Amino acid sequence: MIDLDWRNLPFGYIKTNYNVRCYFRNDKWGELEISSSEEIILHIAATALHYGQEAFEGLKAYRGKDGKIRLFRIDENVKRMADTATYIRMAIPPGDLFKDAVKKAVKLNSEFIPPYESGATLYIRPLLIGTGPQIGVKPAHEFLFMVFVTPVGPYYKHGFNPIDVVIERDSDRSAPLGTGHIKVGGNYAGGMISQDKASNLGYAVSLYVDPKEKKYIDEAGPANFFGIKNNTYITPDSHSILPSVTNKSLMQLAEHLGMKVERRKVPVEELATLEEAGACGTAAVISPINKIVDIENNITYNIAKDCKPGPKTILLYENLTGIQYGLQPDLFNWITIVE
């Protein structure tokens, strides 16, 4: 294992030894290639540069107390990338190719997998881009699929502690029938203006409302939103929301732990009735929410008690991370061991 200050890693890019690549040419995928270069060569007319033919995924490798390396729900990442590629007309990486590339990238960079209980993980970024040249607006004929990894610390520097959130109405993450339900880079580019606005106002993240009526809760910046009340896990339902692997897992866990689960429209006014709330995703797992501020209407929804995570949020977090690190039984067959 390399010598890094594991407990103080940022959530940022750190160079590792190798990445894995595979090209789609002549209507077929080639063999996996190993590269030590951090760079790629692109045609100046590549569709990734001009027409946004780009999809990515995010997952993590966890080093358990038993020393084993675990991947969490990789099949869901395979499926989501396939859904994204289908929607924006790219070649779909076969499931076995995707999984082999991820495992190979993890094993080749095993010295960068943070130690157990360091608070850090190995972040894995599968990436699919259109490399073939086009000047007209149409799909490429050639694509590049690659996987690189980097060790990361917590997404928010304060870790599993409640964050302050501000409601965003001046911009939308995606259109009502746009690309919000798939994982393309353009969705995140469009969200940077609201994230800058939130940061400048002293908030961790913006909470979007629905792009059509501006009445319902949508996403919490780059993460899904959930609320808890009356022993019920509630999360918004909308075409413009990315299906989060973490949120999907939390819904299953909530039911397993005896909670009701509701995936439905969540009116902004309902925030006043929530006992707990959080933002969830691969990067942060769960970020409990302290308060949600509606500047436009001069309303503050105080969620957390004494600025601490609520009991059900803690229970969900401990169960989810317990499975990821092998501390609890893998009741749902979510884990893949990297041999």
Image: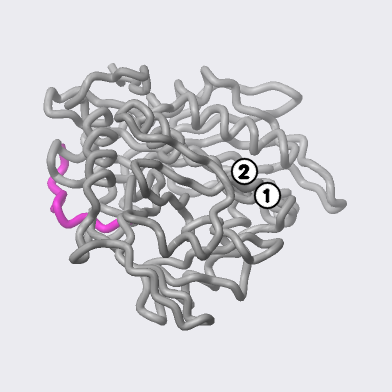
Magenta stretch: dominant SS? loop
Which quadrant, please, contains the N terminus? top left
Count residues near mark 2 (Cα–Cα under 10 Å), then give few for <14, some for 14-19, many for 20+. many
Amino acid type, callout 1: Thr
Residue 221 in picture, x, y percent from top left? 48, 60
Count residues near mark 1 (Cα–Cα under 10 Å), then give few for <14, some for 14-19, many for 20+. many
Disc 1 is placed on an element classified as loop
> How many numbered discs sit on the rendered protein?
2
Note whether residue 331 is visible. Answer: yes
Residue 214 in picture, x, y percent from top left? 64, 66
Q: Mark 1 points at which residue?
A: 179
Q: What stretch is highlighted in magenta?
A: 1-11
Disc 2 is placed on an element classified as loop
Note whether residue 164 is visible. Answer: no
Amino acid type, callout 2: Ile
Camera-side residue of 224 and 35: 224
Q: Name the residue under label 2.
A: 182
Distance between the Cα atoms at labels 1 and 2?
6 Å
**Residue depicted at 23% across the width and 37% down the height:** 113
Kindly indicate whether the residue at mark 2 contacts the one at mark 1 (C-beta within 8 angstroms): yes
